[in-house]
Amino acid sequence: MTAAYVALEGGHVIEGRGRAPGTARGELVFTTAYTGYEESLTDPSYEEQILTFSYPLIGNYGVREERFESDRIHPRAVLAKELTEDVTEWLASEGVPAVDHLDTREVVTDIRDGGAMKCGIAVGEDVTEEDALAELEQCKGMSEHTEIGAQVSVDEAEVHGADNDGDTVALVDCGAKGSIVDSLVARDATVHVLPHDASVADVDAVDPDILFISNGPGDPANYENAISLVEAFVEDTPVAGICLGQQIVAEALGGTTEKMTFGHRGVNQPVLDLESGQVVMTTQNHGYTVADPGEHLEITQINVNDDTPEGIDGIEYDVITRQYHPEANPGPEDTLGFFDDVLAMADVRATAAAPADD
Ligand SMILES: NC(=O)CC[C@H](N)C(=O)O
């Protein structure tokens, strides 16, 4: 059996069965999602993290590229109770260490008690506990990954839905999931996916109806350029954001963000809409949250479990953001209407700007 050691912050080492070999370090988090492992593993928001699946069997319906959210696996390593051959081969083919046959309840309880924590992993024929501890020793805290946006963003602008007749969206790619682009293109939008460090002139050049800030990994405070784009455009252009995007919009408009203890990761997070009183089930993957929306934004939706902000609207500006993932990959589709609401902001603007018809 291939040896596998998982060293947790504080020095506790857990042994498991080695599946995909290698060494890795990252922030240890867990997801309670029971389906959608292909979407989760290819979600760029998991960059620099080690992902524990609390659901006991991962890989039971194979691996299909059409379900991928990006072109590679983003977590640095994967832990589960049982990984199938299919998913193990996929992880191994991308050099991502994987461990199973360990007590994932113990790992999840440790994270719930201690918070998302640093972790080192060593998997292979000859590895020792010390190899995992050496990885742990070198592990940085999430907010120290100051260039994380560059690791996941496109380098050059891309256009999707070029032949569509609808709105033009400038999507600032801080690690965007593919299904966010697909959801907009399916609603007749032309989406210009711009690098995370796009300038004001780059955004102006596509003359967007909507400025959209994507999801992405790491600490929102490290996305200074995206924050400055929101500041530059919000007075004249409707702004939308998902997950990291909500946090960036809040930072830009005088709000603040903070790190949560262990965050929300799963596909059954209940969210209450404060106006309608309706609760919907949502997909989530975040470790930071908006602490204070500031005076230009109001909270419209909250998490039923812990009251954290899930939806935010602009007070005097056209802004809508969501902390959860309305694109629902994986996850329930209750929230897809968000994309219609975003694009409707452009229509309202156009109607208001049109000359009176009399
Ligand atoms: N999915 C995301 O966009 C995650 C946002 C941010 N990195 C967080 O962990 O809170």
Image: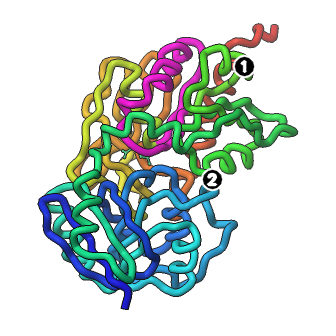
Residue drawn 32% across and 67% down? 121
**In the structure shown, which secondary structural element does the residue marked by tag 2 occupy?**
helix
- Tell me which residue sits at (63%, 27%) in the image: 210
Residue at left offset 60%, top offset 27%: 211
Amino acid type of disc 2? Ser
The spot of residue 104 in percent (x, y) is 27, 77
At mark 1, the secondary structure is loop
The correct choice, above or below, for 187 with respect to 96 in the image is: above
Within 10 Å of disc 1 (Cα), the crowding (few <14, some 14-19, many 20+) is some
Q: Nearer the viewer, residue 42 or 340?
A: 42
Q: Within the displayed image, which quadrant is ligand 1 positioned in?
A: top left
Quarter of the image where the N terminus is located: bottom left
User: For residue 301, what is the image quadrant?
Assistant: top left
Highlighted magenta segment, given as a residue range: 213-242
Front in this rendered view, residue 334 or 161: 161
Q: Which label belongs to residue 179?
A: 2
Q: Residue at x 71, y 37 (%)?
A: 191
- Disc 1 marks which residue? 207
Picture layout, residue 252 above or below residue 84: above
Could you say where residue 306 lies in the image, as x and y percent from the top left? 22, 51
Q: Is residue 97 left or right of residue 60?
A: left
Estimate the x, y position of residue 115 in percent, counting from the top left: 19, 55
Q: In which image quadrant can residue 143 be found?
A: top left
Name the residue at the bottom extreme: 1
Separation of disc 2 and disc 1 at Cα? Answer: 23 Å
Count of numbered circles on the image:
2
Would you say the residues marked 2 and 1 are in contact, meaning their CB atoms lie under 8 Å apart? no
Q: Amino acid at mark 1?
A: Asp
